[in-house]
Amino acid sequence: MTEAQKEKIKLTSGYLNICAAGLTVTGGFVPILNIVYLGQNGGIEANWPTIYLSMWVMVLGFSLHVIGRNALGRLDDE
């Protein structure tokens, strides 16, 4: 594997990790914190769809992180 290919793998992994972090924070934690601290009308029962969506976004962010880590694992193989 050439140095250019190794660098592409590192950059791809870094990009996926940044996307995962941004997605997790903006789509996962912020809506839940909004419900908890601002107390939208309707109480917690009316916000279950938002909570479920936030949980799925956090799972998606974690999945992107795992994909990025696996990409870095290819560097050890060569």
Image (cartoon, rainbow, N blue to C red):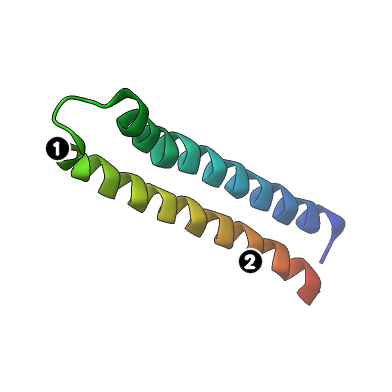
Q: Nearer the viewer, residue 77 or 51?
A: 51
Contact, mark 2 vs mark 1 (Cβ under 8 Å): no
| Residue bearing mark 1 | 46
Give me the residue at 71% from left, 62% from top. Answer: 72
- Relative image position of residue 47 (x, y in whole percent): 20, 38
Q: Secondary structure at mark 1?
A: helix
Tell me: 11 left or right of 37: right
Q: Which quarter of the rendering shows the N terminus? A: bottom right
The image quadrant that residue 44 belongs to is top left
Q: Is residue 66 left or right of residue 59?
A: right
**Is residue 10 found left or right of 27 in the rendered image?**
right
Left or right: 40, with 26 as reference point: left
Say which amino acid is labelled 1.
Answer: Ala
Q: Residue at x 27, y 27 (%)?
A: 39
Name the residue located 35 percent from the left edge and 37 percent from the top edge. 32
Disc 1 crowd, CA 10 A, few/some/many (<14, 14-19, 20+): few
Kindly give the residue lying farthest to the bottom in the view shown. 77
Kind of residue at badge 2: Asn
Establish if 74 lies above or below 63. below
Q: Pick the residue in front: 26 or 17.
A: 26
Q: Nearer the viewer, residue 67 or 31?
A: 31
Asked which quadrant contains residue 51, the reply is: top left
Q: Depth check: give the residue in front, 22 or 71.
A: 22
Q: Which residue is mark 2?
A: 70
Q: Residue at x 18, y 33 (%)?
A: 43
Residue 26 drawn at (x, y percent): 45, 34
Element type at marker 2? helix
Instruction: Count residues near mark 2 (Cα–Cα under 10 Å), then give few for <14, some for 14-19, many for 20+.
Output: few
Label 2 vs label 1, nearer the camera: 1
Mark pair 2, 1: CA separation? 39 Å
